[in-house]
Amino acid sequence: MAEATATRVRSSSIKSEAEFRARLAELGAILLEPYGGSKHPHRAQCAAGHQCTPRPNDIQQGVGVCRVCSGLDPATAEAAFRARLAELGAVLLEPRWLGSLVPHRVRCAAGHESAPAPHAIQRGQGICRACVGHDPATAEAAFRNLMAMLGAMILEPYKSTHAPIRIRCAAGHVSSPRPGDVLGGTGACRSCAGKLWDAFYVVADLEADRIKFGITSGDPRPRLGDHRRDGYLTSVRLLTGLPGDVAPGIERAALAALDLAGIKPIRGREYYDASALAVVLDIADNYPTRPDHTESPMRHTRHTQASA
């Protein structure tokens, strides 16, 4: 058992190194020292010639190789932020630079005061939440107006653009969309839009000690097939025929429980290392109103062939 575990660890390390070197090559960067592990900073030189110390894990999650080129170098970030404020006619109200990830008080050209983070501005977000419709009060008003136009009824207090809220659409379906998604054009009711999620799944890549969970509609085999091609060959849990908002509810509860436990994704929102498995399965197996149609086809037994 210990030997098998060691083999998996070595295999994972070799794969991590190969992916790291491939990504550096793709970005025109050069590794300046031997590979030391996925969480270890490595000396490198970016395509622009800057010396930097990226971590392989950060690169895998989409973080740039070079802090200067990514606008995270303090002097570069401050200069870019001040230039962007001047371009938009905004005034910086903070007496000193606080860092690219820290909100700074500004006054936009229309006179609104807000506190954007310089890094967010560099990534294309607006200076003023009120002017771009992201101010909480503005967003709530827009959501309520849209619900009224669609003939939908809001069934619980509004929290934020990212928090699901129970509504009843004009056809009588009850669902829990995120206001921000609705304002973005996704529609208020999944049933009316033909996007009724009724399956929850957990798949695993045993060689890399990682898992992926998520939701899908109808026959889950196409979605599971996509994950098998990505190395997730083991189906750990598959719950189908879930009513109403149960599948999205399990997904949200699992994400919240993992965040509370301090377990962070290794990629995206629902890709985790194997340490997250027990938490996810506990949520899935004990979530209320789950129907009897439940499949647990595997106890860490590897699929060698895709389902027909």
Image: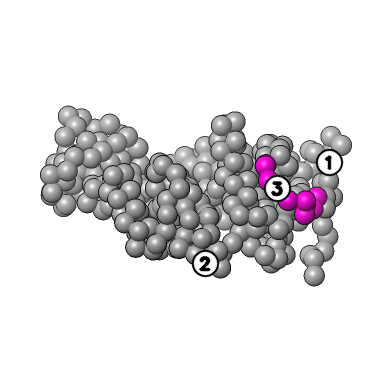
Q: Quadrant of the C terminus?
A: bottom right
Quadrant of the rendered image containing residue 152: bottom left
The image position of residue 290, as x and y in percent, is 70, 47
The image position of residue 7, as x and y in percent, is 79, 42
The image position of residue 259, as x and y in percent, is 55, 35
Secondary structure of the residue carrying numbered label 3: loop
Residue lying furthest bottom in this view? 308
What residue is drawn where x is 83% and y is 46%?
A: 299
Residue lying furthest right in this view? 1
* Identity, as a three-letter code, of the amino acid under mark 3: Arg
Q: CA distance from mark 2 to mark 1?
A: 50 Å
Secondary structure of the residue carrying numbered label 1: helix
Q: Is residue 54 left or right of residue 262?
A: left
* Label 3 crowd (10 A; few <14 / some 14-19 / many >=20): some
What residue is drawn where x is 64% and y is 62%?
A: 217
Where residue 4 is drawn, which disc sits there?
1
| Range drawn in magenta | 287-296
What residue is drawn where x is 31% and y is 56%?
A: 145
The image position of residue 268, as x and y in percent, is 54, 49
Where residue 290 is drawn, which disc sits there?
3
Q: Work out whether 39 lies above or below 247.
A: above
Q: Which residue is mark 2?
A: 192
* Identity, as a three-letter code, of the amino acid under mark 1: Ala
Q: Earlier in the sequence, mark 2 or mark 1?
A: 1
Q: Is residue 119 visible?
A: yes
* Identity, as a three-letter code, of the amino acid under mark 2: Cys
